[in-house]
Structure formats: structure tokens, C-alpha cells
Image (cartoon, rainbow, N blue to C red):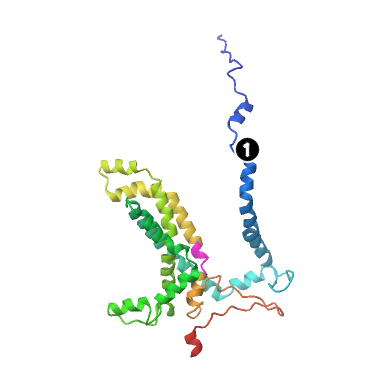
Amino acid sequence: MTAAPAVSRATRTSPHTLSKKRRSPLSGGDSRGAWLFLAPFGLFYLAFLLGPTIWMIITSFFNTSTVKAGLGSFAGFKNYGEMLGRADFWSAMWHTLQFTIYTTPPLVILAFVFAILTNRVRRGQWFFRLAFFLPYILPSATISLIWVFIFTPGTGLWASAQQAVGLTPGAGILASPNTAMIGIAIATVWWTLGFNFVLYLAGLQEIPRELYEAAAVDGATTWEQIRYITLPLLGRTTTLVVLLQIIASLKIFDQVYLMTSGAPASRRRSPSASSPGPRSPTTGSAQPLRPRCSSSSSSS
């Protein structure tokens, strides 16, 4: 028999030594520093997001009121049954889904196209970044006022453009139930396009240019480079953009309320705008939110 070769103790690596080598850099004092940096955000997250969400879920099972102390009587699932049985709730859900369908594809496709075109510009990229991202920093009230002015019948920019091409301006995009959501979607695309544009542009600049140069040497066209290099390498960025856009579209409230006040005929409401209003301090019953009347309707 052949004896097994002996292994010296000097060359052995104990499990304790391996654990030291594999130890995370954020261990000991470093982890404490990381938690200290995360603490301010964690406190705000618990106080203003997670805490109110948990409290909202708890109060949804009670006949509570915002003007009376305590939770009130236990209601169980009656509040949810009342909400799901209301026709305006399902109408608002459909219009929110409709708005998501109108805005998500254009915001993803246009941001991708404009980012590719900007990335090919050698000089002056800062101008395009500023031009696309500047509307995004404006508040929703400012954006709504701008586009209400554009869609104003008779005197707005949209009416002037229609007159310039020989068309007769109608009652206005925001005045018709069939076109009001389209007008809100156009305003939202113009407003939020810059955020997706910046995400795509940052992803494009992480792709090595050597890949495009090698593909060009092999005879690949511009479309083939986009299809086989750009699109696969931007897969994670596209997933992020789509998810953020769907979440933002499902939470729409400001544009609908500021541009149409829930009108025309309250058909442009989102679930946030159609939720029951504050409960009466005496009866505890929900008072429905009513859309504000415009000056023209009040005068008539």
C-alpha cells in the first residue's frame, strides 16, 4: 500500500481563518456607522410612510372619523364591501388603468429614443439633459395650469394651432369625456419624460463604446447595434423604468383634479379622487367629495 501524503500543519487553513477572509467589510465598527447613516431616513420612513400605512389598514376595519378621537365601532369588512359595491369606484379604477395604458408606452419608448439620440451627440449633452429634465422639477400645479391654458377653448395654443391649419376649434379637449383623459396623458408625458430620459441616458453611458466599434467593424448596422447590444444591456434599466412608471400612473391624482376637478361629469376621477370624503362629526357617515364647479357653469 502507498501511504497518503502528509499534509503539513503550516499549509492547512482552519475554518476560523476562512471566516476571517470572508468577513464582510461592513462588520464591527463599520456596520455601526452604516446604521447611523441610515437612521435619519429610517425614522422618516417609519414616521411618514410605514406608520401611516399600518394605521390606515387598522382604521379601515372600524367606523372611525378624522375629527373624533378613538377608532369607533368595529366594522369588519363592511367598509371594503361598501367600496367594492360602488359603481364610481370601478369607474375610477377603469379610468386609472386607461391612463396607465395611455402614458406608460409613450414614456418608455420616447425616453429610450431621445436618450439614444442624445447619447450620439458629442458636444452639448448638458443642454438636452436640462431641456428634458427641467419640466420634471416643476410642481404638478404649475404643469396643470400650463396645460389648462394650452387647452383653453378659443384662446389656447391648441385652438390657435387648429385655426392655423383651417380647423374649427371645438369645446376643448378637457371639456369632452372622450378626450379629457388624452389631454391629461399628453400633459403627463411632457412633464415626466425627463426622469425616464435621464435613467436611460445613464444606462447608455455605462455601455462600453468598444462593443459598438467592434460591431461596426463586423458590418452591423445601427439598428442591429441597438437590437443586439443596446436593448439587451439596458434590460434592467427598462424593467426599472416600466415599474416606476406603472406605479406613478396608478397613483395619479393631482393632474386629474387640478385640470378637470373630476369633471366632465366626474368621469375622469381616479380612485384617490373618488374615495369617500371625511365623515360627519355627528353621524359618522361618509360625505362624498363633490367636484368643484367651474366659473362658467356657476354663472349659468
Residue 117 percent coordinates (x, y) = 33, 55
Looking at the image, which is closer to me, 124 or 19? 124
Give the residue number, with chain letter if any, for mark 1: 27
* The magenta segment: 248-253
Please determine whether, in this image, residue 15 is positioned above or below residue 150: above
**Viewer-proximal residue among 240 and 127:** 127
Q: Is residue 178 visible?
A: no
Residue at x-position 44% and y-position 67%: 188
The amino acid pointed to by label 1 is Ser
Instruction: Count up the numbered dots.
Output: 1
Q: Is residue 216 magenta?
A: no
Q: Is residue 250 magenta?
A: yes
- Residue 282 image offset from top left, x and y in percent: 72, 80
Going 47% across and 63% down the picture, which residue do you hit?
Answer: 137
In screen coordinates, is 197 left or right of 214? right
Residue 7, picture quadrant: top right
SS of the residue under disc 1: loop
- Relative placement, left or right, of 134 versus 30 is left
Indicate left or right for 142 with 116 as reference: right
Rendered-image quadrant of the N terminus? top right
